[in-house]
Amino acid sequence: MTRVNTEHKLNNAIDRARRWSPFLSMILDREPAIAQSLAQGHLDLDLSSAALDMPVAKRLRLARRAMALNVAIGDLAGVLDLTAVTGALTRFADQALDTAIRAAIEERTPGAEPLGFTAIALGKQGSGELNYSSDIDPILLFDPVTLPRKPREEPEQAAVRIGKRVVELLQARDGDGYVLRVDLRLRPSPEITPIVLPVEAAIGYYEAQALPWERAAFIRARAAAGDIALGQRFLDTIRPFVWRRALDFGAIGEIRGISARIRDHHSQGQAFGPGYDLKRGRGGIREAEFFAQIHQLIHGGRDATLRAPATRDALARLAGAGWIGTSEAQALIDGYTLLRTIEHRVQMIDDRQTHALPTGDALDRVAKLHGLDDAGALLALLSPHVAATGRIYDALDDTERPAFSHDAVTLETDLAAAGFVAPEPARRRIEAWRGGAYPALRSPAAREALEAVLPTLVNAFATAPVPQAALLRLDALLERLPSAINIFRLLEARPGLATLLAAILSHAPTLADDLGRRPDLLDGLIDATALEPVDDIAALEASMRAGDAGGDYQARLDHVRRVVGERRFALGAQIVAGASDPLDVAAGYARVAEAAIAVLARATIDEFAKAHGAVPGSELVILALGRMGGAMLTHASDLDLIYLFTGDFTAESDGAKPLGATLYYNRLAQRVTAALSVATAAGPLYQIDTRLRPSGGQGPLVVTLDSFARYQREDAWTWEHMALTRARAVFGSMAARTAVADTVRTVLEGDRPTRDVVADAGSMRADMAAHKPPKGPLDAKLLPGGLVDLEFAVHVVQLVHRTGFDADLGKAIDTLIQRGLVPASLRGAHDVLTRLLVTLRLVAPDASPPGHATEDLIARAIGVADWPAVVATLESTRQEVSRFWAELTGEQDG
């Protein structure tokens, strides 16, 4: 923008301000230096008649007056957009509040550092969106230990006196006006609490007693003034209260209720036209804010990028993440921008705290101040935006669902109409729930939530493959819940999730059991990505390192367990929903496990080092074998791990409690195993099997890499070399992983004892068959010709021919096929058996034939038409594997 153009715009704005705004006209006269600067085309937001040697209150009032004039003229001229306007107003509020706190402390305790007293900005100050006549809504907190105070003065008394002085400095009026209106009523229980609260008491309140609307208020919370470090510590501590991973749709309903009460209370400002309330009216500023906050509360606990405090930023991020439509977001952003701008025009007229369009000639003045011809032009400009915002916000309400009858005959008729073939057992189950059959169903809130969700549940479960079986499993889930309110609210708000839940309860007892232990696992399925392939390992690690654990080791363990539980549950749901190939799900399970190993091993090492330090020139390496080594797990897989360490075994750690390297790493590995396996409040993680280590259960838990290499070259048995074919380092530096990989490759390619691999493998397989028979007729792993036989056959070929080594069994088979060492049909056999194993671990963990409804799911999972095709495919695959195994070992096929 050219200097001449800017000067023209600013002078045009000055002219409109003098003609249509008594307040701006007055301060143009009282601030001649600023008026002259603006008229000459200079906009300097720091220009003020305030001087540093003035009393604090006068200096702040004059600074506020100068700031209001500069920003208003820049706004009217179009030189400052809404972001710049609200940002400038907020920065001034922060500075004024901080100055008042420092002055109040200095007056009472001269020379004291302004510590132990902080202001948490909420509302528009917290989000950086203040308007011209906004109150500020801080919560004032103090730390009794660090707060400056007079001798023999109690910290509570000192804090309140400082707080009162801060309010007085900001709010008192004189001929120069005032600085800021201060509203302290957003603090906990304002009717009974002092105006300044001890920080620990405030933390206790928000962790245990806070109301749902207070969560929404803290979306826009910020440590704004005073002791910022104290304020940030408070916000970090209560973050789990605001951003809950377990969704609370009751809180969402409370926010909707606030909106409804606002509409009722301000009914005169709801109708669009003269007198319309720009903030509280239907389609107004508040509804755009609430729309964003509702979606942030739903999704922000899982996605920290959505926690933007400013409304327009939040809407843009929600759209970018796919939670709201791009066109919806843009409509709300455009409407919000225009309504906030006109709200500013209304407030510029007389510096009044108002949000309503005036009536009569006063509305014409607002229009002309904005640069329009008259009130009609202003209403025409606003109307489509108000209508669009109201329409989008109203769409948050689902269509009203009819209540289900309490009359037994009518209820049974309704159930039959919904699709229940046998409605009578379903009716009895619902009546039991209504009668408070379980503690989770006995509160008035739980009964209300049940009635609200019943239509959704009935419609979803009526279309389930086995409705009565699904209802019985839901009944078992409700029996174990401490409260059913949240799961009912979640299902009411997400009817599609109820359908998926019905499918899970119908088909997958493994997932149903998981859900019974952790009902919040269902929350993870509302994420649009839940039925997509899981992230790569780096992204998974990042999500496991995120969260609210901070430096707390136990909190980190809990956080990783929550993330792993959610990802594993979602992967299982992908199979039930038919959303993913079981092979991809198996790879996803393995990526989740590898990320968990990396994060928990690192956290455990860091925690262990606090007492024992580190062993110089040495590190822990974790080697995975079996299905984990091959990166293809099932929902129930153990993790086969070997712990190694590099460097000199005679070295000693450098911590306060030093340990020799061997003892150090054996204790550390025990801690890592516990981190990966011991259940915490967030549930279990993995079963860890370390019996594949050198010398098995008789050997030490951890050995050096050199000792491991020597053992494999000189003493290991055939079964150990077979296991080594799927060995893969999953934790350690790149150099250490490379060293392990080189050792494994050297051993497998021939640097090992000469043994009769075929005879040893045949003997081992026979021994396994005798001691570990198949679980059932569908045991794709242990049946003759199953996955174990396939793995044995592949490993025998690899060891005999010293080629085709790859931890990924499928890739190893591909290489052996290319070299003509195994039949091409083995790759298809591997895929069929793996898909079947992964699927059955969820839907038929006892390996027995499932119900007819689940037969179709299994057929779909392995890519055949129907259940007879499943049986035939399993039989032909087993025959193919058995035939090749017999050829290798010289045993008779069959």
Image: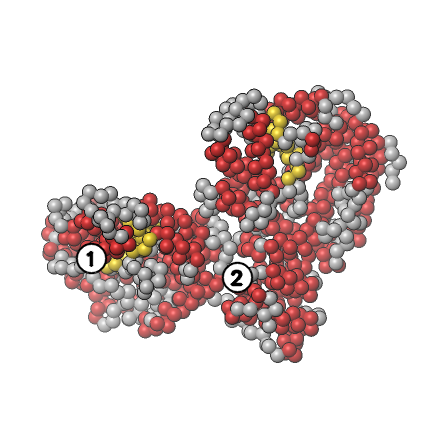
Disc 2: which residue: 486
> Outermost residue, right direction?
892
Distance from the alpha carbon under mark 2 to that under mark 1: 44 Å
Q: Work out whether residue 169 can be spotted.
A: yes
Q: Work out whether residue 12 can be spotted.
A: no
Label 1: how many Cα within 10 Å (few below 14, some 14–19, many 20+): some
**Residue 476, disc:** none
Disc 1: which residue: 168
567 to 450, vertically: above or below: above
Task: Tell me which amino acid carries mark 1.
Answer: Glu
- In this orientation, which residue lies closer to the viewer: 851 or 207? 207
| Residue at the spot 31% in from the left edge and 46% down from the top edge | 145
> Which type of secondary structure does the marked residue at label 1 adopt?
helix
Please identify the quadrant where the C terminus is shown: top right
- In this orientation, which residue lies closer to the viewer: 669 or 779? 669
| Residue at the spot 39% in from the left edge and 66% down from the top edge | 259
782 to 139, vertically: above or below: above
- In this orientation, which residue lies closer to the viewer: 742 or 227? 227
